[in-house]
Image (cartoon, helix red, strand yellow):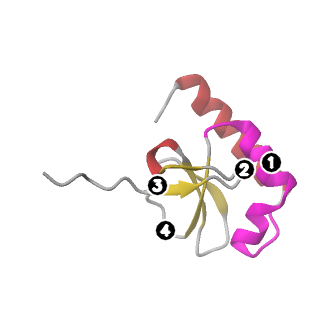
C-alpha cells in the first residue's frame, strides 16, 4: 500500500518545516483583514506559524508577515493574534 504524503509548511517565526496540522494558519482575507485561521479553511492568502507565542514574536520582529502579505500589519492585530494563541494553548484545541 502506498504511503500517504504529509503536507509540510514552513513556520514564519522559527523557519522550521513541520507538518501542516501542527501549525496554525494566518490568513489575509480578500478585504485585507489579517487574522488567525484555526480551521485552515478561510478564503485568502495564508501563511503558517507554530502554536507558540515565541514564533509569533519572531515573525513580528523580523516583519515576515508584512513581507508575506505585502502590507503593513498593525500592532493591534498582533495583540489579538497573541491573545488567541494564548487561549488555544490553555484549552488545548487542535
User: In this rendering, which labeled residue sits more in front, label 2 or label 4?
Assistant: 2
Q: Are marks 2 and 1 in contact (CB under 8 Å)?
A: yes
User: In this rendering, which labeled residue sits more in front, label 3 or label 4?
Assistant: 3
Neighbour tally class for label 3: few under 14, some 14-19, many 20 plus, Cα within 10 Å: some
Give the SS element for disc 4: loop
Give the SS element for disc 3: loop
Give the SS element for disc 1: helix
Q: Are marks 3 and 4 in contact (CB under 8 Å)?
A: no
Q: Which residue is the site of mark 3?
A: 40
Distance between the alpha carbons at the discs numbered 3 and 4: 9 Å
Residue found at the far top of this picture: 90
The answer to which quarter of the image holds residue 35 is bottom right
Q: Which mark is residue 13?
A: 2
Q: Earlier in the sequence, mark 2 or mark 3?
A: 2
Asked if the magenta segment contains residue 79, the reply would be no
| Residue nearest the viewer, comparing 67 with 10 | 10
The residue sitting at 44% across, 46% down in the picture is: 21
Q: Which residue is the site of mark 1?
A: 58
Asked if the magenta segment contains residue 59, the reply would be yes
Distance between the alpha carbons at the discs numbered 2 and 3: 18 Å
Q: Which mark is residue 43?
A: 4
Region rendered in magenta: 51-73
The residue sitting at 48% across, 31% down in the picture is: 93
Q: Earlier in the sequence, mark 1 or mark 4?
A: 4
Residue 2 horizontal side relative to residue 34, left or right: left
User: In this rendering, which labeled residue sits more in front, label 3 or label 1?
Assistant: 1
Residue 11 horizontal side relative to residue 61, left or right: left
Amino acid at each position: 500500500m502506498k504511503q500517504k504524503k504529509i503536507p509540510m509548511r514552513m513556520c514564519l517565526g522559527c523557519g522550521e518545516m513541520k507538518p501542516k496540522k501542527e501549525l496554525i494558519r494566518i490568513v489575509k482575507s480578500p478585504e485585507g483583514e489579517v487574522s488567525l485561521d484555526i480551521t485552515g479553511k478561510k478564503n485568502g492568502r495564508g501563511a503558517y506559524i507554530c502554536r507558540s507565542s515565541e514564533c509569533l514574536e519572531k515573525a513580528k520582529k523580523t516583519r515576515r508577515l508584512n513581507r508575506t502579505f505585502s502590507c503593513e500589519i498593525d500592532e493591534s492585530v498582533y495583540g489579538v493574534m497573541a491573545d488567541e494563541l494564548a487561549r488555544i494553548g490553555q484549552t488545548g484545541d487542535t
